[in-house]
Amino acid sequence: MVNLEWYRTFKSIYETGTLTGAAEALFVSQPGVSLHLSSLESYVGYKLFDRTSRKMVPTERGKVMYNFVFEALIKLEEAEKHFHRSTEKEKPTLSLGMCFETFQLMLEPYLSSLSFNVIVKFGEYPQMLNDLDNGILDLVITPHMESMANIAYKPFSKEKIVLVAGSKNDTTDFDLMHKDGDLKGMQEWLKHQIWYGTSGDMEHLMRFWHCNFNKRLDFKPNYIVPNMSSIVRCIKGMNGFAVLPDFLCRHEIQNGSVKLIWEGSKVMENTLHFAMRKKTIYAAEIKTIQEIFEKEMMPLENETSTQVA
């Protein structure tokens, strides 16, 4: 088989127009370039260039060969650049899966300080866990657990699904009915309030309503916004009701711009887990993300890593 370097030398001569230019482009000596060219011409059996005093002019056969080998050589050069081991240590890239609100509230403020690259995917938890199992994601923040042999789950916090309202809402009547245990009155009163919901996920509201009133939700929110973080921004310091995970509006409840109205007669609580593959090359990066979430969210006590079998 012909030496591949002969073709590379031929391409450089063709593109630079001189033996000297080709030698400089290839970081080899000019005699080496001349040797490669004469060897290739001997192999193919015809001249590839007409030599002048100032320039190497390709022959018709030389032009045909250039057009024929050009794309193949470009691909080989790209492969060489891509797979060549760099002397610099490349930054690892961690792929994460979580809901948008969790990312925005917990992780987004820390991104610029991380020593590694991050790709974040939003979506349904079953699909994200499947992507984790298939190696597409490296870590998923999830309240759901799926039975997958290669996935380990570490609980780290809990979220309560609660009824909240903007600070301008007068809830005196609701509080009195709640004190008297008048669930029917509470239900009717709530149905006549201004409600906020999200376009993608009404699960919290529907579950909360059915769990506490034992009835299906029979009204639609007045305002549909892109996500739960938008709801918090819309109601804080204003009017409006919503059912949300408590951690999403913890600071607003503390500063009084959002009121915690009711945790429900049956508290809806989800345990949040770190889901990861049992074998990973990103253990250090994953630990960094875990420490951020453990710092930002209420920690669990006496919990250990678990696996769904």
Image (spheres, rainbow, N blue to C red):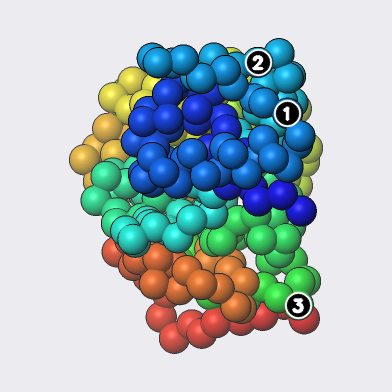
Label drawn at residue 225: none
Mark 2 and 1 residues: CB-CB less than 8 Å, in contact? Answer: yes
Q: Which residue is mark 2?
A: 59
Residue 299, placed above or below residue 161: below
Q: In the image, what residue occupies the spot 73% across and 19% down?
A: 61
Q: In the image, what residue occupies the spot 67% across and 26% down?
A: 47
Label 3's element? loop
* Mark 2 → mark 3, Cα distance in angstroms: 64 Å
Label 2's element? loop
- Give x and y (percent) for residue 173: 45, 32
Most extreme residue toward the left is 255
Whether residue 75 is visible here, answered yes or no, is: no
Mark 1 and 3 residues: CB-CB less than 8 Å, in contact? Answer: no
Q: In the image, what residue occupies the spot 57% across and 17% down?
A: 50
Q: Amino acid at mark 2?
A: Thr
Name the residue nearer the viewer: 294 or 48: 48
Q: In the image, what residue occupies the spot 62% across and 72% down?
A: 277
Label drawn at residue 46: 1
* Mark 1 → mark 3, Cα distance in angstroms: 64 Å
- Quick check: 268 left or right of 105? right
Label drawn at residue 149: 3
Image quarter of residue 148: bottom right
Q: Amino acid at mark 3?
A: Ala
User: Quadrant of the image for the C terminus?
Assistant: bottom right
Name the residue nearer the viewer: 19 or 293: 19
Q: Nearer the viewer, mark 2 or mark 3?
A: 2
Residue 28, placed above or below residue 269: above
- Give x and y (percent) for residue 84: 48, 56
Circle count: 3
Q: Earlier in the sequence, mark 2 or mark 3?
A: 2
Q: Amino acid at mark 1?
A: Tyr
